[in-house]
């Protein structure tokens, strides 16, 4: 599923245009963690599945309307994954792939006792995907794959507030994108179906202004 970037831009503008509230509802968050990236592609004859874990990091701004509901705008680098496989000609095919995301969404918070909270996230992710393919039988990069689009992301996690200003969280977020690689493997009689999953475990540190 792909959602037009103008929708994301409109939501982002609405989010950033919110006035400052007297209850100090704005927060800035820094994120660091690990992204499990999985790339799959198939046609009528064959299929491949490549996966790798990479270091992921990002920044996020949050406006909290009350104890239960907020909106967020963030940027995340999912890092570079590397994987290789042997094709039918006994050549080693190497791949390097990476994903970047601009996320706009809502944040739901369920306060618990002792400063702990449960957190849920849902929104739109404007993503960019790039991959380079190498072949042991040929020097250099033999193919460059690139695509971009917009899809839903969602996540769950927990949060602990040390004070009115400082808090820390741990979250698991998921993003699944359908890649359009028809222009690369240009064969209308046997189109390639490809998708890329990015599942991230992130530690966040936030400061409320």
Image (cartoon, rainbow, N blue to C red):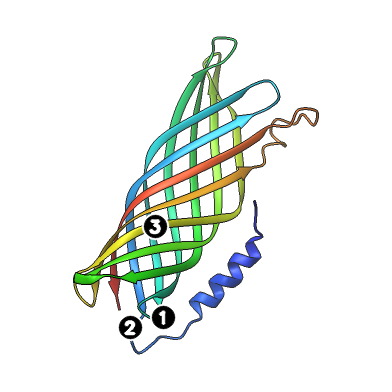
Cα–Cα span, label 3 and label 1: 19 Å
Residue 203 to residue 131: above or below: below
User: What crowding class fits label 3: few (fewer than 14 Cα within 10 Å), some (14-19), or many (20 or more)?
Assistant: some
Kindly indicate whether the residue at mark 3 contacts the one at mark 2 (C-beta within 8 angstroms).
no
Q: Is residue 86 left or right of residue 107?
A: right
Q: Is residue 43 left or right of residue 128?
A: right
Examine the image and state in which quarter residue 152 appears. Answer: bottom right
Residue 199 to residue 47: above or below: below
**Residue furthest out toward the right:** 189
Pick the front one: 115 or 101? 115
Pick the front one: 31 or 108? 108
Instruction: Give the residue number, with chain letter if any, for mark 1.
Output: 65
**Residue furthest out toward the bottom:** 22
Judged from the image, the secondary structure of the residue bearing numbered disc 2 is loop
Residue 157 to residue 175: above or below: below
Instruction: Give the residue number, with chain letter if any, for mark 2.
Output: 24
| Residue under the point 37% across and 77% down | 26
User: What crowding class fits label 2: few (fewer than 14 Cα within 10 Å), some (14-19), or many (20 or more)?
Assistant: some
Instruction: Give the residue number, with chain letter if any, for mark 3.
Output: 156
| Residue under the point 55% across and 74% down | 13
């Amino acid at each position: 599923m792909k959602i037009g970037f103008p929708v994301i831009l409109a939501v982002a503008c609405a989010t950033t245009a919110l006035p400052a509230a007297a209850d100090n509802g704005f927060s800035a968050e820094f994120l660091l963690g690990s992204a499990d990236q999985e790339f799959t592609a198939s046609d009528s004859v064959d299929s491949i599945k490549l996966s790798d874990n990479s270091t992921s990091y990002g920044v996020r701004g949050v406006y909290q309307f009350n104890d239960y509901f907020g909106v967020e705008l963030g940027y995340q680098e999912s890092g570079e994954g590397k994987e290789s496989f042997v094709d039918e000609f006994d050549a080693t095919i190497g791949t390097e792939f990476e994903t970047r995301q601009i996320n706009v969404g809502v944040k739901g918070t369920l306060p618990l006792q002792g400063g702990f909270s449960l957190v849920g996230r849902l929104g739109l992710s404007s993503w960019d995907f790039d991959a380079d393919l190498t072949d042991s039988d040929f020097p250099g990069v033999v193919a460059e794959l690139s695509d971009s689009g917009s899809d839903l992301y969602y996540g769950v996690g927990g949060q602990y507030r040390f004070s009115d200003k400082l808090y820390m969280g741990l979250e698991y977020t998921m993003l699944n994108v359908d890649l359009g690689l028809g222009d690369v493997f240009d064969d209308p009689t046997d189109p390639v179906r490809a998708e890329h999953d990015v599942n991230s475990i992130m530690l966040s540190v936030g400061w409320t202004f």
